[in-house]
């Protein structure tokens, strides 16, 4: 780690836009913006990474997320200079230096999961971080997420059967099982409009979050937080209906409770106090 952080190069100064890492197996990841705490060998050459992945593995394509992240160029001292190796170790003391996966390629089928990685990364931003770092969601992103929501809906018989569905399902399953806190600030709704439509019920008085659907999907989630732009009038009847449905799934799961927090809303306080779940 000292060699990397004392003598390495900042990834923001690199002339290479992508780095590659081969894995001899089809691993799944809870997030596609991550930190590699252990020594991780990267290469600037995709064919080199493919040789390490073997026929049953995958190749990750990684790109800059924070320009201050450092790597050590091993080419000048390696016995295999043709591998064009870079050594990466994220520091234990700084959580702000991740690297981003932009695609995953399956060696056995030559299938490129880039569109899924993009959609899942944006969905993660929608419900957990929510800023405009990656720009607007597209209709394709929304279609992918909608298929995943339907596939993992325990009350729905829909099953994903498109090309590459098995691994794509496994990636999304790992992601959803690691979500414990959902945070949605509506000020970024314009960036994620196509995906946000899937998360809300449109009522006569505006949008109400689909709490029941989120509870079914994210079975380990312990807190759902939404922040509206201004003093928004909440459709109390629709909101309470969503909470009643959500309560059924919370009781059937291992969760003891689910904390719900809303900011900048007006609601019928008397109806809320009288509500039973």
Image (cartoon, rainbow, N blue to C red):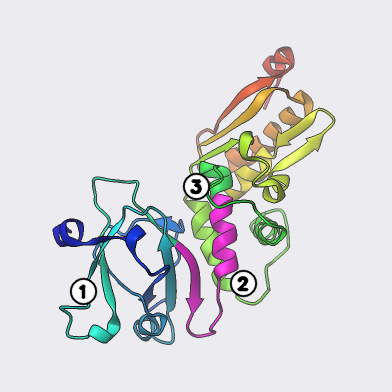
Extreme residue in the right direction = 204
Q: Which residue: 44% across, 77% down?
A: 58
Q: Is residue 244 above or below residue 61?
A: above
x, y percentage for residue 162? 68, 74
Give left or right: position of 158 versus 262: right
Count the marks.
Answer: 3
Q: Is residue 119 magenta?
A: yes
Q: Which residue is mark 1?
A: 74
Q: Is residue 173 visible?
A: yes
Q: Secondary structure at mark 2?
A: helix
Quadrant of residue 112 within the rendered picture: bottom right
First in sequence: mark 1 or mark 3?
Answer: 1
Name the residue that disc number 3 marks.
179
Q: Secondary structure at mark 1?
A: loop
Report crowding for label 3: few under 14, some 14 to 19, many 20 or more residues within 10 A (C-alpha): many
> Which image quarter holds the N terminus?
bottom left
Asked whether the beta carbons under mark 1 and mark 3 sit within 8 Å of each other, the answer is no
Kindly tell me whether residue 253 is visible in this rendering.
Answer: no
- The CA distance from mark 1 to mark 2 is 37 Å
**CA distance separating discs 2 and 3:** 21 Å
């Amino acid at each position: 780690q000292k060699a990397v952080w004392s003598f390495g190069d900042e990834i923001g100064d690199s002339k290479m836009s992508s780095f590659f890492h081969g894995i001899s197996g089809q691993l799944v990841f809870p997030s596609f913006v991550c930190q590699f705490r252990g020594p991780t060998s990267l290469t600037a050459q995709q064919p080199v990474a493919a040789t390490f992945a073997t026929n049953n593995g995958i190749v990750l394509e990684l790109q800059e997320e924070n320009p201050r992240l450092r790597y050590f160029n091993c080419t000048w001292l390696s016995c295999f200079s043709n591998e064009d190796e870079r050594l990466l170790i994220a520091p234990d003391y700084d959580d702000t230096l991740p690297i981003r996966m932009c695609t995953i390629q399956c060696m056995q089928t030559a299938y490129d999961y880039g569109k899924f990685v993009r959609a899942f990364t944006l969905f993660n931003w929608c419900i957990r971080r929510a800023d405009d770092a990656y720009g607007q969601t597209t209709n394709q992103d929304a279609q992918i997420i909608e298929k995943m929501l339907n596939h993992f809906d325990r009350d729905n018989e829909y099953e994903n059967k498109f090309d590459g569905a098995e691994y794509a399902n496994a990636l999304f399953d790992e992601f959803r099982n690691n979500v414990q806190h959902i945070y949605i600030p509506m000020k970024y709704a314009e960036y994620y409009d196509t995906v946000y439509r899937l998360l809300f019920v449109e009522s006569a008085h505006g949008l109400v979050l689909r709490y029941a659907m989120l509870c079914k999907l994210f079975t380990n989630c312990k807190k759902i937080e939404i922040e509206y732009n201004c003093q928004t009038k909440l459709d109390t009847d629709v909101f309470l209906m969503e909470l009643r449905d959500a309560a059924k799934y919370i009781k059937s799961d291992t969760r003891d409770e689910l904390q719900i927090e809303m900011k900048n809303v007006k609601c019928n306080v008397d109806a809320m106090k009288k509500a039973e779940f």
